[in-house]
Image (cartoon, rainbow, N blue to C red):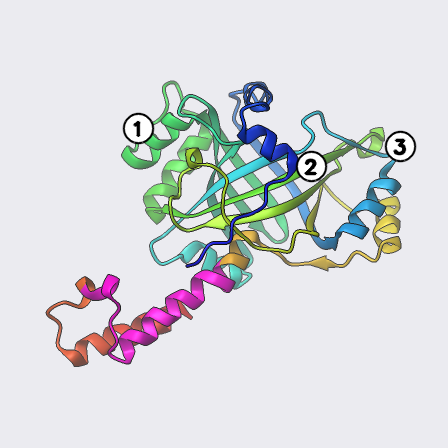
Amino acid sequence: MAQTMMTPLSKSAIKSNGMFASDEKLRRAKVSSTNYVFKRKEIKFLINREQHDRLLKLFRGIMCEDEYGLSTICNIYLDTEDFDLIRRSIDRPVYKEKLRLRSYGTPGNGDRVFLEIKKKYKGIVYKRRASMTLWEAKQYLEKGERPEKKKEQIFNELDYCIMHYHPVPKLYLAYDRTAYYCQLDEYKDVRITFDSGIRFRQDDIKLEDGDRGEKLLPDDMYIMEIKIPGAMPLWLLDMLTEVKAERVSFSKYGSIYQKYILPDIMRKVQARIDGRILPAETSRFEGKPEAEEKAAAADEFKTAV
């Protein structure tokens, strides 16, 4: 797949030249080694730059940018060989889950990362995350070796997820995020994030190999995500109405799967049905009779859709 490289934001460009590296290291150091459990609603909106800028003006005195400012969030999404997790998620079941490895900035082996299970049940998001170094995460995912002294319940859940799905790295996904928290005491758990510069790659799926990738959205579009423990505050509803923000059902991984990954799978499957086996696929069908080969390809076509 041809890759269109992102034009880095100014802060990302500074970071890539090593001038911002110390701040990124500090950010990762300040995120403690504690394991976390989150439970909340997550409501998403697709907005343009004009709406984004108007919202920031409306936020004054209510929402405040967090201490980290603009940061780059890097993820590896793990899935089954046949993308069962994301395919199930796209079908919008009552319960769904995803597994990902996350870092803040491009990490080295000794930097802290987070292995997360993100579950959604009846509209409520439950996120379990365990912190460890990148090296420990590799050892755990590749060899099943738990980080030293990590015997918490979250790791029991991770163990089960890994044994059940046998996940492998399927997608690298990065974006630039600015987060805001509410200054009003009664709404202190309200958090809003703006994600832009969403990019991805299906090759070289490693956190340590940089945040390059192909663009998912135009440069002037943002995914705004409102994270709340309960009902939406009326003052926030009024702001969204004023800028005409429309709620969307949007998954970054799901969108990439539907727009890029699934069409590529279908193209390869159709080629096999037509008898045009692609070079990379030859070994899977070597020695099979033609009828059996086409039947296997047809079965794979049904599975893909």
Left/right of residue 46 with respect to residue 18 in the rendered view = right
Residue 52: x %, y % from top left: 78, 47
Q: Is residue 99 above or below residue 94?
A: above
Three-letter residue code for mark 3: Gly
Three-letter residue code for mark 2: Thr
Q: Nearer the viewer, residue 184 or 73?
A: 73
The secondary structure type at the circle numbered 3 is: loop
Residue under the point 70% across and 35% down? 179
Quadrant including the N terminus: bottom left
- 264 drawn magenta: yes
Q: CA distance from mark 1 to mark 3?
A: 48 Å
Residue under the point 51% across and 57% down? 256
* Disc 3 target residue: 61
Residue under the point 48% across and 47% down? 98
The secondary structure that dominates the magenta segment is: helix
Label 1, residues with CA under 10 Å away: few <14, some 14-19, many ≥20: few
Label 3, residues with CA under 10 Å away: few <14, some 14-19, many ≥20: few
Q: Residue furthest left?
A: 287
* Disc 1 target residue: 145
Q: Is residue 250 above or below residue 119?
A: below
Which contiguous range is marked in magenta?
257-282
* Disc 2 target residue: 178
